Image (spheres, rainbow, N blue to C red):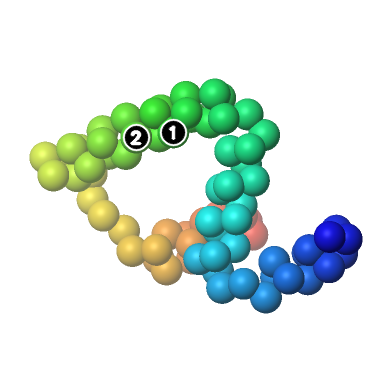
Amino acid sequence: MDSVLLKEAALKLSPFERAQLIDALWQSLDPAEQAEIDAAWLEESQDRLAAYRQGEVEAVDGESALASLRENLSQ
């Protein structure tokens, strides 16, 4: 399949389907390295969840977090 046609088809996918495609393509580049990255992110997410449950960090909704990032980037 021509890469231009492939790109056009991919852009017609839902955001979730595009994310799945990105993940599959990324993993195809170096699956061994991806397993290591996935393990590190799993550990990080477990640490963050534990910190949240113990009251060490406060949750912020996505819209507020993005608005804060945008504000800091524009300064």
Residue marked by disc 1: 38
Instruction: Please state if 45 lies on the left or on the right of 55 as rendered.
Output: right
Image coords of residue 12 (percent x, y): 67, 75
Q: Quadrant of the N terminus?
A: bottom right
Instruction: Please state if 10 lies on the left or on the right of 47 as rendered.
Output: right
Amino acid carrying label 1: it is Asp
**Where on the picture, by quarter, is residue 40?**
top left
Disc 2 element: helix
Which residue: 18% across, 37% down?
50
Residue sticking out furthest to the front: 1
Cα gap from disc 1 to disc 2, whole angstroms: 6 Å
Residue 71 seen:
no
Image coords of residue 38 (percent x, y): 44, 33
**Where on the picture, by quarter, is residue 13?**
bottom right
Q: Quadrant of the C terminus?
A: bottom right
Residue marked by disc 2: 42
Image coords of residue 59 (percent x, y): 26, 55
